[in-house]
Amino acid sequence: MTPRTICFIAACCALAAQAPLRVGVDVPGILDLRDASAAEWVPADVRDPAQVQARVDAWARRVAPLQAQAAVRILLPRGEGRIPLLLAAAQALRAAHPGVVLYLAFDPEAPPILDEAAWGAVQGGALLPADLGPDPAAWGPLLARAQEGFPGRPWSLWLPSDPGPRLGQLLGDGGRVVAPPGTPAARLAQEAGTQGDVEGGFGTLLLRDPATGQARAWRFENAAWVAAAPPRDRHEVQVTAREAYDVGALLAKVRAERLRESLRVKTVEADLALDLHIQSEQGTGTDLGFRFRAFRAAGEPEETLQKEVLFNGVRAKIGAGLQLPIVESRVSMAAPAALTLTERYRYEDGGPAGPGQRFIRFTPADGDPLFYTGTLRVDEASGRVLEERSGRSGLPGIIKSEDRILTYGEPEPGLWTQTGAQTFERWVVGGRIAQVSRTAVYSNFLFNGGGFSERREAVRKSDGTMLRATPDGVRYFNKQADGTRVTEARPRSWGRGVGGLLLIDPTLPLPVIPLGGLAYFDYDAWGKGIQISALTAILYNQGQMTIPNAFAGFDASVRLAFSLLPSTQRPIRNGHPVDGEGVGLRSGRLVLGLAHDLGAGFRLQGRADLAYEHFSKPWKDDHWTPGFILPPSGWNRQLTGELSWLHRGFRLAGFYGEGRRPEGIYGLPWSFSHTIADYQRWGGSVGYDLKVGQGAWVHGEAGYLGGKGFDRFQSLDLGGTGGDVRIAGLRSDAITSDQVTYAKAGLVLPTGPRLRLTLSLDQAWARALDDRKTYALTGLGIAGDLPGFGWFTTVRVDLGVGLASTLPGARSVNGYVALLRVF
């Protein structure tokens, strides 16, 4: 280890030991090198011992008067050779006094020092009272100017007077303050102690112990700093530099750039488009969109005015005052704080990212799942973050994991800000796992626009729905009777809906069947993160409860469903239902689920399905055959395991289940059949959703289902309106199958503000139970989403047209018309 390396390590130790707020520290001494020349003080050839020794002796004589100084400022000349002089002076000072603290003296006319090697020569920069002047309002901009000229290390400010509430800004912006004795800042320093990581703003300050993570907060009131409750879910930073690249130096440059941006921007207005695409296990999925106008002022939380809501890309009819539930991961839609002095991340070099760009990898310092792991792509010259790709898993609540891409741009010359975010999230909903793509795009920016306060106040006084950012996430900003607005204490988590459904199938006894139901859900019931949902259609009822992270990282769920009206099970022969030999079936079902994330998007889930099936005569006498022997009623029990993987639009899943039901016979006395007590089911599927434009999606999927031990009462369910596999245009009860292979391709087209068109082409190959032949089935799905009218929020028409089939009579035109009201 060379002496220079030893000096560099000592500098790093001293840097870590400096407190952010100090009192009574003497002004550093001065080493004035403005008259020095690098040619005179730096060896021209380090291989020449004479030259080296001559310079060593000369430096020893020059720094000898400063040996008693605990700290020294180095004032450099403005011309060439500044960096070699700085390195040489630092080496000489540390050789004479290893414990000396070194600073770069401030020179407003000097060119910037952007060499990482030079940054390691000193512990920071020094701004003295003569540099700062008497006006505290000018100290922040002066600090930013100093950081721009020497961004690699923190700057200390020897204040001539108390800064008042601006102390929080100076500390939060990376400054290290030496306060005059007897001032409010000095009293705060005595109370706060000497160590900690700092975050601050105008009149606010937070100090966190880096060893324990314990946080303390203060606010400036009545000319004094008083203790306050610390905010939750805040972060701290740890930086690890690699030998090949000084990541700390690049991070310092990024901090300086961000500081300059924050000083330039006082107010921001922008349009915000937020779109959620919920991927389905089958089909093209569901979309929910919001359009906002956002208002943000320096030091204040962002407020947004909800302008419209879109269901499946079409404007929904939302009643006045209706508030939809907010689902977001903690801090998933906030601007990244990955490079402030209050983060708890470790950084390391990720290598070149392109000409003039660098990757920086970061990981949580303590493995907390609430913190992100990812990569920053940084412009090395400016310190601007160009893109962040990060993710986290093992989250509590409805969102289990997320992968995100944050993008930045320059909406106006010289103003760099976040312009968008794309997040792929995995939600636990109804005991199942679903992938959600969340896209946020800012546009139509207005920076520092005149009349900002008036426009924002007009929005606040309007009757529109508003939201406001808080440290714990977005909340509704509700209007009160007196015209003021108050932020709700808890996020809205529940909703209700009434639906009307016209089921269309010309092959049924009733070609059009009207249905209706009432639904309720709450994803944070009783404030415990428990999800509950209920659906009643009078004759059919269902309730469900899901408890994320119930124990040991497992998610537990329970679902209960029962039907009051018996359905009729009719045998299928040669593709047609037989009029006789029908059996009525009334059932109730209890499903218990337990699931656990395995990491990297994988999830293992187990289900116990307990159903009671009661067989009886069909409700229509035309379907009954006298003397027909009913199958035995009783409990149908099934255990199923499923492994799934979700990642950035991809979905891969496979399952295997075994079941047992009552053993017996059924059928006519002269040709009865046996029910097989034990049966198995298995299958797998793969799907992918790709966004190809604003509101446009391409979907593809393929799968296989199979099993054994099947009969007409236990088989795979195919149909044009639902079942294990939905094939558009397939007549209900067209085939009883024990093996199905299928493929689907879908396209979502935003054809206009009042219509979104969805097309799908379905193909299936199903093996029939009765003749053991495999039949090909082809169908075209056509769906249209329309704006709500009258009492309804939104309308959807979904029809299937059978195109081809090798099974006679299997083709049909069927589907449904759904009308939904959310309230």
Image (tube, rainbow, N blue to C red):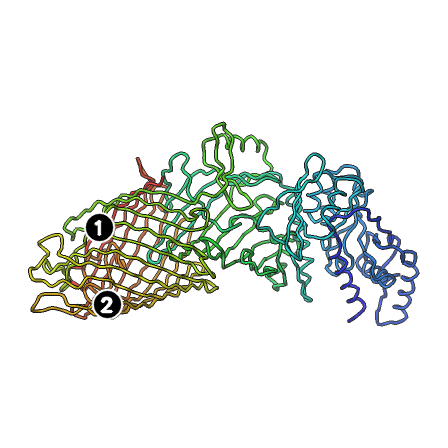
| Residue 817 % position (x, y) | 26, 46
Q: Which residue type carries mark 2?
A: Asp
Q: Residue at x 27, y 62 (%)?
A: 763
Q: What residue would you read off at disc 1? A: 564
Using the image as rendered, state which of residue 178 and residue 756 is in the foreground: 178
Label 1 Cα crowd, 10 Å radius (few <14 / some 14-19 / many 20+): few
| Residue 334 % position (x, y) | 54, 48
Residue 820 in which image quadrant: top left
Q: Where does the C terminus fall, quadrant-wise?
A: top left
| Residue 579 % position (x, y) | 10, 58
| Residue 728 % position (x, y) | 25, 56
Residue 302 in which image quadrant: top right
Q: What residue would you read off at disc 2? A: 738
Using the image as rendered, state which of residue 160 and residue 62 is in the foreground: 160
Q: Where does the N terminus fall, quadrant-wise?
A: bottom right
Say whether marks 2 and 1 touch (CB < 8 Å). Answer: no
Q: Is residue 386 left or right of residue 727?
A: right
